[in-house]
Image (cartoon, helix red, strand yellow):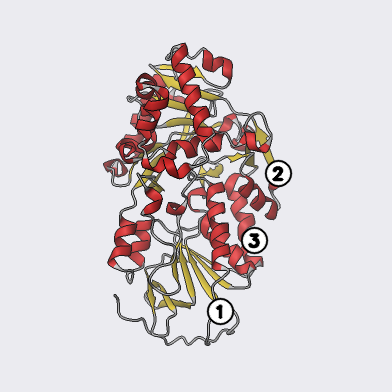
Amino acid sequence: MTYSKSQQRWAIVGGGFLGMTLALRLAQQGKSVTLYESAPSFGGLASAWQLGDVVWDRHYHITLFSDLSLRSLLRELGLEEEICWQKARTGFYVDSKLHSMSNALEFLRFPPLNLLEKVRLAATILRASRITDWKSLEKVHVSDWLEKWSGSHVLNKIWLPLLRAKLGESYRDTSAAFIWATIARLYAARRTGTKTELFGYVTGGYSRIIQHFEQILLRERVECHVGQAVRAITSTTSGRLRVERTPGNIGLFDKVVVTAAAPIAARVCAQLTPAEKKSLGDIKYQGIICPSLLLEHSLSDFYITNIADGRIPYTAVIEMSSIVDRQLFGGRALVYLPKYVSSDSIDFDKPDDQIREEFMCALERMYPRFSRNHLLCFQVSRVKHLVPIPTINYSESLPKVETSVPGLFILNSAHILNGTLNVNETIQLAESGARRFARQQPPIADYSEHELPTAHR
């Protein structure tokens, strides 16, 4: 089989939103693109699954009004006008009590803090929202920065429980850029001219978005493969790249972009130098154990309930049905109970029944009116490498996108420097990567299917 000299052959390894967006943009540049995804369907962390008779997102996702990159892509997919926008309420569980924190008045009435502490907390959030030099925050530990601006009592009462819930003990290694990125996204509504952030969703959730995305990819002649785990990527004698999926199932490409998490990238790219492998291995990841619950009745009218109570095993309560029309869930409530853990946590080995029992006991403690009889479905998602932790001086030690293997690139969520892991930031990373790859030169010779891999370095 031969290919035109003028058309580059690219492979994208990883079919999440990063890989899908890259594949689309490279195909629009005139490249021949093949997209590989190991899971049975595309979408990655934004993929959907079935809960009883309901199909919805495996993990909780929402579109903010200020998510301009995501909205632009949805417009391209013909779905932006179908976004349903809602305002959301926020709860806070502390000292075994549930409080509303949805507006300024409720904040002023918040019992766990006195007036001066509330002023300092508000000043901290305002200060973070106005910082433009995020890189300077990389040199400061997040707890030190928060204590400086909020004081020790607010740090211990509010910030540390939230940091531990999201980062575990890894918060000790995390820079202040983390809290800046989190607050900056929530304050982004002010830059779009709205007084309050609006939360949106597309009817059908990400399942429908991904279906439309696949149709666009096929229209752009992207060759799509799901259920195809890449085992190895090696350079051939001619300098092309050999992508091996299963024994005898091999593709040859001019360029390959690996979008998988750093440990996976290091494993499949065996020809990387020891220094490159170490750089990838040094990236610390936080994982997640996230049950989805389908309930007969709502728990509350809060979209998110932040938890500052070490006795509760999950990070927060996310009630998607407080925003999404419950008719899409058959009149029932959809709730997520995320628990963030280190990528090597023994909690990943806990059986579903044990997680269910621990979480049900905590729900009964938080919501006296909750009954286990209300539970219709309980399914657990586990992801070991969810989000890279922004450690001190993170950007200075980040692996380069272009590797020592000619034509091989590694671009993943670890390269999101000044944001939080969400679909909008992922699309922005893909767009910038596509602009970078647009400068790559075309191949100089036709293909031969008999090329052999070079020796491993």
- Say what secondary structure mark 1 lies in: loop
Q: Circle 1 is placed at which residue position?
A: 442
Total labels: the figure holds: 3
Q: CA distance from mark 1 to mark 2?
A: 39 Å
Place of residue 371 in the rendered image (x, y in percent of width and height, measured from the top left)? 44, 22
**Residue at position x 46%, y 22% in the image:** 121
Which residue is under mark 2? 82
Residue 64 lies in quadrant: top right
Point 37% across, 26% down: residue = 147
Residue type at the position of mark 2:
Glu
Residue to which mark 3 is pinned: 215
Amino acid type of the residue that numbered disc 3 sits on in the rendered structure: Gln
Residue type of the residue flagged with mark 1: Pro
Q: Position of residue 144 (x, y in %)?
A: 35, 31
Q: Which residue occupies 41% across, 61% down?
A: 400
Kindly state the secondary structure of the residue where label 3 is placed: helix
Q: Is residue 69 above or below residue 215?
A: above
Would residue 204 be seen by someone viewing this image from the given angle? yes
Disc 1 versus disc 2: nearer the observer: 1
Do callouts 2 and 3 mark residues in contact (Cβ within 8 Å)? no
